[in-house]
Image (tube, coloured by chain):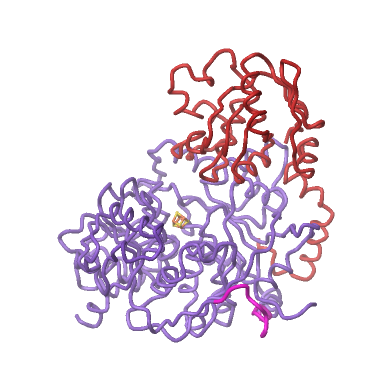
Chain colours: A purple, B red
């Protein structure tokens, strides 16, 4: 074996089935997750070609994007119909296709249903050292466990279903070292927002990121999933955290995780999964976690973020003319003026959810801020959408649901919800949302919607004051 | 995938540069569950123009479309290719294509032919006169007036198209190696199997 290798290179090498002269590899895929939006045409393609799903046992189907997050069964326990006919048809297609091809299917009313990127790790389907794909760009999330995980298009979904492989060329590698520790009131979401703001939304293009450093190691698994999830927003194909004892403890005992002697063998292999000393990355950056304050986005790309203590920047203050231009357009869309204090921006909607921030720690973080407080009068609607049915149930056992409900939030069923507004949860045009999701693109939360990205605790703080707020002012100050 | 060899028939003489994927198929149609059925809503902004070539009965069901520069620019949606295939289009002759569109077209067996600007102009004119013949084997576009133009194509892509090999078919050609990899996995990494 030639020289020291990075974690990415080790996982890649382990999965090469065949290498063509031009460097293209046929890469084996260990885990494939499908949902309703990008799978129907892939199944059609298989049927048209008379092909089967090669490894239904390595595939998991879960509906999430289109599902309404209101009650799914009536008082008698009967399934309620889905109003939007196109959403209903997409969901029905998955419900037909999964069993027809022998694929494990977690249905819309199963207790385990949730967002694909929450369900995979939670069920122990996503594992360290595996290659994992899904027809959704935020598949990078599973890299928080040390899986090489990335999003694919519909033709590739079909390719994986038929062959359990993909034809790919290796990516370049990028180390993001997060030094130091997280300050008071600062979460992994703040770190990744600040990171992307610093390096730029295109900095990771063509690369797979590996997160290293003291703060990365200190992060909980849920925090790592949040950071890895946002790798795609830095332009990277995937993001990786080297698996460690914390990872193994997280995975152990989950329903689809290895058991018994298999577990011991898995563990022995996972312990080899770290970048060798002296291995070279194509690119390296370092940030100091200590210097990061709670962070929010003010514009319409992940370039547009700042510390909550700051102001809306003046587009003229940017060096490049293209950047000045996009910043001006962003401010016009967002209805903001340069120089305004970020903490003076009033919001009407709160969304706590999405595959970035809808796990139990996220809900606990928000609930800690909301405890004993109420929505500010200016808030029209506040949604909390747990990432999965299991997260929801655990929160209910901990009494967290009461805190949200008493504060004035709607306690919803799991799904993608207001993250992309494919289901009925939308932000109306011209209105503003404090959101724990991952994209602040124009129209992402509904046509004309204005999104400010932040951590769950920060979204809770905005909920009680009615404006973007430094959560630290509310913490321990009750 | 169907093998592509000879494509013969009328050609929509569309011309124009920078036909983007939103023109081919607007975003609001992405909620569909099939590749089929998109043909009816394709090119709606062009179809709104009176007297447009796409609705001219002379070209009804034409298997070829002639365009200008940078055809298929914009988003990566594969739906654009599906919509054109659904209309019955099997080849596009243009001055140039966006990379992503050309890749998606190849994955779906839609032939993309690049010719010089002058040649494209002549093809456009001849498309109005009668049927066009595209021979992939000989790499030639043959026009009603008897003139013909040679075109270049990546040898690997040509091989795949002629033999109806999609990327999936090619990967399946490596079946023995995939199976061997899986045998090894079942032996050395049994933990990768999902418990029943
Ligand atoms: S929550 Fe949002 S980002 Fe995550 S999978 Fe759903 S739509 Fe995509």
Question: In front here: A179 or A252?
Answer: A179
Q: Quick check: which quadrant has ligand 1? A: bottom left
Q: Is residue A403 left or right of residue B75?
A: left
Q: Is residue B94 left or right of residue A71?
A: right
Q: Residue A198 lies in what quarter of the image? A: bottom left
Q: How many labels does the image show?
A: 0
Q: Which image quarter is the N terminus of chain A in? A: bottom right
Q: Main secondary structure of the magenta part?
A: loop
The stretch drawn in magenta includes residue A278: yes
- Asked if residue A48 is positioned above or below residue B186 in the image, the reply reads above
Question: In front here: B125 or A49?
Answer: B125
Q: What stretch is highlighted in magenta?
A: A271-284
Examine the rendering and report whether any part of residue A399 can be seen: no
Examine the rendering and report whether any part of residue A260 can be seen: yes
Instruction: Tell me residue A118's x, y (percent).
Output: 49, 63
**Residue in the picture at 54% in, 71% down:** A144
Question: In front here: B176 or B185?
Answer: B176
**Residue in the picture at 52% in, 80% down:** A177
Q: Is residue A410 left or right of residue A326?
A: left
The stretch drawn in magenta includes residue A458: no
Q: In this view, does B97 lie to the left or right of A183?
A: right
- Asked if residue A240 is positioned above or below residue A44 in the image, the reply reads below
Instruction: Tell me residue A428's x, y (percent).
Output: 27, 47
Q: Which image quarter is the C terminus of chain A in? A: bottom left
**Residue in the picture at 72% in, 81% down:** A4
């Amino acid at each position: 074996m030639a020289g020291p290798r990075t974690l990415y290179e080790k996982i890649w090498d382990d999965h090469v089935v065949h290498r063509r002269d031009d460097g293209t590899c046929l890469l084996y895929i260990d885990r494939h997750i499908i949902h309703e939006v990008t799978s129907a045409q892939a199944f059609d393609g298989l049927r048209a070609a008379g092909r089967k799903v090669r490894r239904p046992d390595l595939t998991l189907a879960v509906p999430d994007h289109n599902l309404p997050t209101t009650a799914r069964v009536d008082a008698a326990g009967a399934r309620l119909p889905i109003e939007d006919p196109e959403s209903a048809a997409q969901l029905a297609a998955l419900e037909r296709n999964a069993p027809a091809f022998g694929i494990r299917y977690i249905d819309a009313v199963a207790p385990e249903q949730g967002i694909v990127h929450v369900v995979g790790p939670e069920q122990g389907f996503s594992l360290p050292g595996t290659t994992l794909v899904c027809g959704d760009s935020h598949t990078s999330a599973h890299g928080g466990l040390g899986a090489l995980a990335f999003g694919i298009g519909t033709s590739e979904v079909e390719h994986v279903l038929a062959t359990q492989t993909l034809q790919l060329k290796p990516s370049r590698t990028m180390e993001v070292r997060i030094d130091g520790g997280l300050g008071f009131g600062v979460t992994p979401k703040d770190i990744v927002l600040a990171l992307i703001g610093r390096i730029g939304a295109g900095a990771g293009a063509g690369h797979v990121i590996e997160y290293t450093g003291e703060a990365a190691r200190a992060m909980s698994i849920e925090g790592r999933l949040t950071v890895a999830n946002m790798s795609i927003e830095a332009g990277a194909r995937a993001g990786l955290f080297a698996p460690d004892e914390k990872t193994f403890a997280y995975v152990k005992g989950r329903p689809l995780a290895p058991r018994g002697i298999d577990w011991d063998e898995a563990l022995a292999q996972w312990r080899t999964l770290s970048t060798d000393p002296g291995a070279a990355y194509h690119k390296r950056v370092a940030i100091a976690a200590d210097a990061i304050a709670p962070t929010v986005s003010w514009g319409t790309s992940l370039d547009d973020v700042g510390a909550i203590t700051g102001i809306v920047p003046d587009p003229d203050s940017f060096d490049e003319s293209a950047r000045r231009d996009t910043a001006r357009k962003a401010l016009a869309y967002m209805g903001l003026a340069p120089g305004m204090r970020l903490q003076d921006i009033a919001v009407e909607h709160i969304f706590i959810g999405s595959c970035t921030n809808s796990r139990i720690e996220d809900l606990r973080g928000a609930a800690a801020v909301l405890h004993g407080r109420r929505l500010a009068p200016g808030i029209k609607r506040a949604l909390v959408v747990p990432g999965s049915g299991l997260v929801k149930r655990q929160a209910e056992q901990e009494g967290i649901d009461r805190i949200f409900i008493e504060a004035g939030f709607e306690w919803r069923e799991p799904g993608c919800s207001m993250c992309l507004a494919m289901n009925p949860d939308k932000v109306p045009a011209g209105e503003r949302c404090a959101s724990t999701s991952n994209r602040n693109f124009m129209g992402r939360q509904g046509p004309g919607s204005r999104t400010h990205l932040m951590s769950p605790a920060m979204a809770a703080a905005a909920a009680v004051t009615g404006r973007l707020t430094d959560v630290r002012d509310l913490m321990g100050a009750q | 995938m169907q093998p592509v060899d000879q494509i013969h028939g009328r050609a929509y003489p569309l011309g124009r540069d920078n036909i983007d994927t939103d023109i081919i198929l607007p975003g609001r149609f992405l909620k569909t569950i099939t590749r089929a059925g998109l043909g009816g809503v394709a090119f709606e902004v062009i179809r709104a123009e009176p007297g447009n070539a796409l609705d001219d009965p002379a070209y009804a069901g034409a298997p070829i479309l002639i365009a200008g520069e940078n055809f298929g620019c914009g988003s990566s949606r594969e739906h654009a290719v599906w919509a054109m295939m659904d209309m019955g289009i099997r080849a596009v002759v243009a001055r140039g294509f966006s990379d992503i569109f050309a890749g998606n077209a190849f994955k779906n067996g839609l032939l993309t032919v690049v010719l010089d600007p002058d040649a494209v102009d002549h093809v456009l004119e001849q498309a109005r006169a009668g049927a066009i013949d595209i021979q992939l084997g000989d790499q030639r576009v043959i026009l009603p007036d008897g003139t013909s133009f040679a075109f270049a194509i990546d040898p690997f892509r040509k091989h795949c198209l002629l033999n109806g090999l999609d990327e999936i078919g090619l990967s399946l050609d490596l079946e023995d190696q995939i199976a061997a990899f899986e045998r090894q996995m079942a032996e050395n990494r049994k933990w990768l199997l999902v418990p029943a």
